[in-house]
Amino acid sequence: MSSVFADEHLLFSPVTPQADAIPTIFAFPNEYTVGITSLGYQVVWAALALNPRVQVSRLFTDVQESLPSRPELLGFSVSWELDYVNILSLLERLEVPLRAADRTDAHPLVFGGGPVLTANPEPFADFFDVVLLGDGEHLLEAFVAAYDAVRGASRREVLRHLAQVPGVYVPSLYTVTYEATDGAIAYILPIDSAIPPEVEKQTYRGNVLSASTVVTPRAAWESIYMVEVVRSCPEMCRFCLASYLTLPFRPASFEASLIPAIERGLTATRRLGLLGASVTQHPEFEDVLDYLDQPQFDGVRVSLSSVRTNTVTEKLARVLVKRESRSITIAVESGSDRLRRIINKKLENDEIVQAAVHAKAGGLSSLKLYGMAGIPGEEPDDIAATVAMMQQLKRAAPGLRLTLGCSTFVPKAHTPFQWQGVNPQAEKRLKLLQKQLRPMGVDFRPESYNWSVIQALISRGDRRLSPLLEQVRHYGDTLGSYRRAFKEFRGQLPPLDYYVFSDWDTDQMLPWDHLRGPLPKSTLVKHRDSALVVDAPLLDAQPALT
């Protein structure tokens, strides 16, 4: 076994697979240090390793465990759109045809899951036999059991059987018809009446959430033990996939989930990461802070993922400093109150200033902020407002190191802004922010505009993109490669601008309309329409699920 795996400290005991266990490869399409830092990958791998019906081996782009010679299942956890290139490379390495249509009974069933595929699997439809939509807690067990029940049947029979499992999507069993070869989608239908017309994302509603199953010094965050504090987010920012796709908001039980998980982690490491889209909005977060403030945590390094700005208190900062953290991260999106109303960000500049004051008073040395350029409805004055806000923060908390990470708005499926295109002015606005903020002493870190364009392409893409994505690999990983491929495929699909920059009509068929998310399309339309009325009231609670 590779020394990489020998360095792992497992926090569960894999079972001995039964004699006729299903030979399975579970892959992460990136290097080990990236994949093993994914909590989702860790949890799914552990679930497979705890199932006696499965014999599972792990595969990364740089290392692998001993792989079965004839795997029956080959799974991928996909959390970053651009990792699709590595999926194709791994399929080639394993001598599995890239396209599902070219596979025979001798090839493994290729399945995938994770946030990218749950949001919109259509650009990858040609490459996957099966896509698991939603939370893995129940879905994974149902998938394995369903496969085991028809194991040995023909590939066609197996796929038709799996398509009956809630949350299991078999792309080849649905046909997409277009208004024209390079036009919009006309309709999406199952191939016959025995196949469900829609596939619904599966949602785990329990209050015992995920925690690391392995700790290793080889992780991107060395020796970190991760605990999921909350799932989803109650804020309902209209661009946010992490909120809308994962509804409803679920906090982990303090007694039944958080304390046992943390205690288990401390047997393996002294580094603890509390994860969630809005960790400090856990209803018992004050109890969590008091718990972490106990002497037993002396020498433990605690870090939080992004927290809600108006929950940054001096007490929070003080406890984090005591637990060896030096910074905290907040998502503000913009310095413009008007723009934050458009996106339903219930936050005022005064609260952002107060967060900086509290961070410094509590002893933190750095405040990291997340911003965004190109938000629908954004005007040049909104960019100026962000610069003014950063100036105000420097005055209010002198000596506090300020970092502003800034991305470009990318439309995501199942959110109210899925119909809005990327603003082509975003690139200039990122450069303007850089020009004005860096002389002020703000550490400005813009994300690549060009890669945001490709993210948007994949986020809004349909299955006509599969052959284009396959071709792009031969040209190299640049924006120019995608533009070159679009020229080559001209007439066979819409132009790049249609997918990336166009605002779509709310009554048009979307590539993922046959895949049901937490909220109906009609509700998302209402939320989008509210965004277009700047003075509309902010949403104070998440809408009821249907």
Image (cartoon, helix red, strand yellow):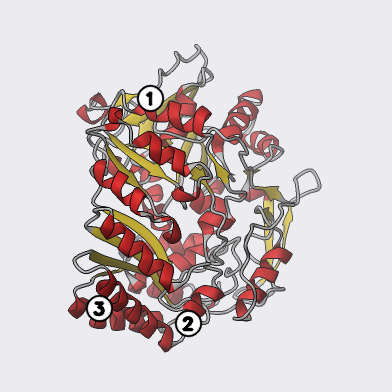
Q: Which mark is residue 378?
A: 2
At x 31%, y 23%, the residue is: 267
Front label number (2 vs 1): 1
x then y, percent, for residue 327: 27, 54
| Cα–Cα span, label 2 and label 1 | 46 Å
x then y, percent, for residue 13: 40, 17
At x 62%, y 49%, the residue is: 248
Of pointers 2 and 1, the one earlier in the residue sequence: 1
- Whether residue 85 is situated above or below residue 495 in the rendered picture: above
Kind of residue at badge 3: Leu
Element under disc 2: loop
Element under disc 1: helix
Q: Pick the residue in front: 176 or 370.
A: 370
Q: Give the crowd class for mark 1: few <14, some 14-19, many >=20 residues within 10 Å.
A: some
Q: Give the crowd class for mark 3: few <14, some 14-19, many >=20 residues within 10 Å.
A: many
Residue where numbered disc 1 is placed: 264
x then y, percent, for residue 150: 66, 26
Does 439 sit left or right of 491 as displayed? left
Q: Within the image, what quadrant is residue 187 found in? A: bottom right
Kind of residue at badge 2: Glu
Front label number (2 vs 3): 3
x then y, percent, for residue 117: 52, 51
Residue where numbered disc 3 is placed: 437
Q: Pick the residue in front: 449 or 164.
A: 449
Q: Within the image, what quadrant is residue 37 found in? A: top left
Of pointers 3 and 1, the one earlier in the residue sequence: 1
